[in-house]
Amino acid sequence: MIELLYPWLLILIPLPLLIWLVIKPKQPRLTSIRTPLFTNWNAIQQNQSVSSTKLLFKNLLTFIIWTLIVTATARPQWIDEPIELPTSGRDLLLSIDISGSMEEEDLQLEGKRTNRLEVVKSILSEFIEKREGDRLGLVLFGEKAYLQTPLTFDLQTVQFMLDETVIGLAGASRTAIGDGIGLSIKRLRERPAENRVLILLTDGRNNSGELDPIEAAKLAKHAGIKIYTIGVGADKQTRRSLLFGTTTFNPSAELDEETLKVVAKLTGGQYFRARSSEELAQIYDLLDQLEPVEDKPEIYRPIQELYFWALLAALGFLILPVVINLIGGLINRSKTSSVIDSNKGEEHAS
């Protein structure tokens, strides 16, 4: 429907009518013309009739232009039907370790042994699907940290970029946990949301980058960012060899749980340990409860400005007399040319 942003301005539309009523036009003085009475009176009547018609047309045109300008100033707008935009005001970044250790096949997915990254991607997909209403982003870190997906409501894009994530994109030999937190802080601080959350998942310890994880956590606390940390990887795995037979070892020996606990505690978050795909799924279910999605949607009504149409119409009426005079001049020239050609034809005939 159409609405006016400043409807009170429409009271100015009758202003020209009031001015015309208050200020009476002066009657033109008729000079004496030395012609017969009837001829003089007939010419005066014809001139007055033509003059009155032109004056009426001029006044009507001026009033229309004035009305259109006032209407444009009142800012007419077309307001579409309301659209619900689910939003919680929460910005949630997922920071995922993609170093070489995430290739360790110590977890199972659907009964098959699978590397850690594939399990994380599978379970994280379900978590992303449930976050309708939050802005999600994706930060990846290995030897370096980089932003894979900026914060967005478009969960399909986040899911697509997660599916495209492979080990080695950020370097495979080392793990820069501190830089991953630091980059996440930088992106979250750019947003005005009150609830800023970072979920960091890793299977190792910080051995690369310029920023220490504890110092990064202090920066996150100062920025009002809550960090949940997840240590992923089994703590027991068996391996068979020809020389030593079956041996048991800890594939998560490099996991620095103490640092991850301190990072979470400093920022008001929690630390979780995922030794299996089932535990990892339970952790993300718990995160859904700790950071619930807001149920109340935000109402948005698309608005299209229409004032320029009124201005274009006013411009069209403004140049209308010029167009009419131009067309009239062309018609008169055509008639004059026809009369001249006719007279020339009569002269030649005589």
Image (tube, rainbow, N blue to C red):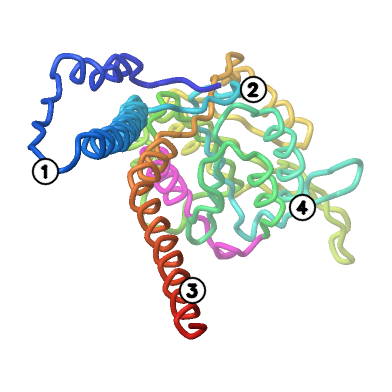
Which amino acid type is marked by label 2? Asp
Which amino acid type is marked by label 4? Asn
- Point out the tag, 3 or 4, that comes first from the N-terminus: 4
- Point out the tag, 4 or 2, that comes first from the N-terminus: 4
Residue 288 image label: 2
- Point out the tag, 2 or 1, that comes first from the N-terminus: 1
For the residue carrying disc 3, how many other residues have a C-alpha within 10 Å: few (<14), some (14-19), or many (20+)?
few
Which amino acid type is marked by label 1? Arg
Of 281 and 247, nearer the camera is 281
Which residues lie in the magenta part?
Answer: 167-190
* Image x and y of residue 100, in percent: 64, 61
Residue 34 image label: 1
Of 73 and 190, nearer the camera is 73
Residue 115 image label: 4
Q: Tag 4's secondary structure?
A: loop
Vertical side of 198 occupied by 166: above or below: below
Give left or right: position of 294 versus 303. right
* Image x and y of residue 197, in percent: 49, 30
Residue 342 image label: 3
Q: Tag 1's secondary structure?
A: loop
Of the two numbered discs 4 and 1 in the rendering, the one whose residue sits closer to the viewer = 1
CA gap between label 3 and label 4 equals 101 Å
CA gap between label 2 and label 1 equals 103 Å
